[in-house]
Image: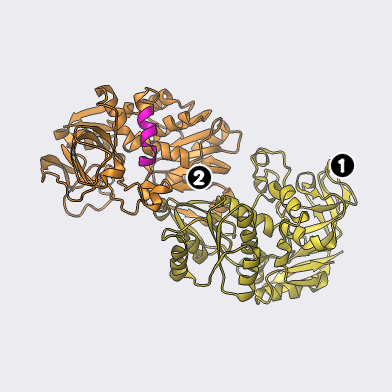
Chain colours: A orange, B yellow
Amino acid sequence: MRGAVIHAPGDVRFEERDDPEIIHPTDAVIRTVATCVCGSDLWPYRGAEPIGDPHPMGHEYVGIVEEVGDEVANVKPGQFVVGSFATSDNTCANCRNGWQSNCLHREFMSTCQADHIRIPNAHGTLVATDGHPDAAFVPSLLAVSDVMGTGWYAALAAEVKPGSTAVVVGDGAVGLCGVIAARELGAERIIAMSRHTSRQNLALAFGATDIVSERGDEGIARVKDLTGGIGADSVLECVGNPESMHQALHSARPGGNVGFVGVPHEVSLDGQELFFSHVGVRGGPAPVRRYLPDLIDRVLSGRINPGKVFDLTLPLDQVAEGYQAMDERRAIKALLKP
Amino acid sequence: MRGAVIHAPGDVRFEERDDPEIIHPTDAVIRTVATCVCGSDLWPYRGAEPIGDPHPMGHEYVGIVEEVGDEVANVKPGQFVVGSFATSDNTCANCRNGWQSNCLHREFMSTCQADHIRIPNAHGTLVATDGHPDAAFVPSLLAVSDVMGTGWYAALAAEVKPGSTAVVVGDGAVGLCGVIAARELGAERIIAMSRHTSRQNLALAFGATDIVSERGDEGIARVKDLTGGIGADSVLECVGNPESMHQALHSARPGGNVGFVGVPHEVSLDGQELFFSHVGVRGGPAPVRRYLPDLIDRVLSGRINPGKVFDLTLPLDQVAEGYQAMDERRAIKALLKP
């Protein structure tokens, strides 16, 4: 089979790779219906994370089950499935607590930009839809496997509640999905921080009520202006660098909450500053598996359409162009079709 | 009138000071019934915080109202009152959100080790009891003004829930009150980390179910042993140094919560470590005013007896001995009577 392999910063190739096989009885192999490039894939692509030896890429996927191991009873060959970028047995203590992305047997997916994928812990990771969904739903179901699930978690970690005020820091696919989540969870005012017209427009379409294009101290001042001088109840931090975290922490009101889902790079939080802010913070890789049934329902019922974040669709063999387009910010997110 | 003044590390004196007066129409002046020395007073006493010019000390108090400003309608001369170490107008946006210790007009109390005290924002800070309480309740009511209110907030910030598991890091008065709070909020298992027999015994009397005397990695391993290998649902961090914060963060299970109430000294949190832990953190000076009516009820109904943390009672003029006894860990907490 064929799939993406990163060799060096800026160098992603579409190559022959070994066919995936059932290794453990809890594995499944799926034929990829759609996969995509993630903002976090750009960290190694830009040389901001070490690459080491050439290795496959990709952790978002929907597909058709081709084969399952002996212990996989929840899905069967021929079914259309959605999974999470973090696999989980869905039975360990952390899974039972709702933290499937911290499963004691977790494996992060990393081979999904390919026409076939082995899914470890398939029994606790994959959720099948009723029948095969219409092709129009595929982008949104693909989004659920990571960016929509992650935006959802950001909003929950930031404790968005009906009638509350939310700020979304970051206008990438996760931030935009965070806007959807904040709206679904009942936020009355949703302030999207974005400087790019196309992303501002998508944020507004997804339910943002205000756009703040300023950053840094000016951005914080604008948010305060919009929130009675004290800051927002909830802030979704969807970037992961020191500037975005600063923006997030200072946009929250005393006693407010920051949910942070951008993998932090060189971020540290000053204990005393956090203390006197009274702001609560929670982050992490989203426990997408916890939300899958609900989010799949919201997609298939037409309530949400996170697939709109894909503004570029390419054949899988043009995966390198997908990386390049996102790196150059020509695309928000690139969907890849085998 | 007379009160404590700190001149230098280790040098607290009982001196003549100006009589407090009504300055603003929202002020009150009270005659002190009891005050005390706080663990946080030891930071400057030990030279760990700059002192600058000699200045009064103390932020915990109960007393009898002597005089009120024109805008103070909630209490009147002759009433017994309990307040918070952080004053609040109880009407601003932050107060309405329940964060009175982040009131837009907040002043931290700092002159309470004295026979008379001016209370700024008295209208939003003081709560009167029904009649004058029996002397036996005074220590517990005094505890409510800071350490019990702070332990309560630590347990709420750590999201202690019925049936949950809680760890308390720190066996000072706040940590011991945190044990009371965890028990009141329904924690099933309460692990107190303490190496001192008298404090261990008080923790057990307050409702701790387990004592862990180890620290550092050994302490963390012991907590994991007691919590199914994954850590506790809730951790109350009641110290405020890098070691105690490390202990707290690593004692919480994935997705658990740390409430931190020890004023952080040289503490920083690594963003990526916090991210992958899924642990939620919230700290700050406790919004004691929010809890005062409830905690006063719990004291006067005999449900809780946090006054037991005072294992040394001195006349106010021996305030210097109170500091010394706590500094040398001969006393958990010293109560001072004018």
Of residues B205 and A195, the one nearer the viewer is B205
Observer able to see residue B32: yes
- The secondary structure type at the circle numbered 1 is loop
Residue B191, given in percent of the width and then of the height, sits at 54, 63
Q: Hey, what amino acid is under mark 1?
A: Asp
Q: Which residues are magenta?
A: A289-297
- The number of numbered discs placed on residues in the rendered structure image is 2
What secondary structure characterizes most of the magenta part? helix
x, y percentage for residue B293? Answer: 74, 48
Residue name at image x 66 percent, y 74 percent: B327
Looking at the figure, which quarter contains the C terminus of chain B?
Answer: bottom right
Write down the quadrant of residue B45 in the picture: bottom right
Disc 2 to disc 1, C-alpha distance: 39 Å
Task: Specify whether residue B284 is in view.
Answer: no
Q: Which residue is mark 1?
A: B70
Check if residue B289 falls in the magenta segment.
no
Circle 2: residue type: Leu
| Image coords of residue A90 (percent x, y) | 35, 46
In-front residue for pair B73/A44: B73
User: Can you identify the residue that label 2 sits on?
Assistant: A249
Q: Left or right of B30: which side holds A243?
A: left
Callout 2: 10 Å neighbours few (<14), some, many (20+)? many
Residue B289 rendering spot, x and y as whole percentages: 71, 48
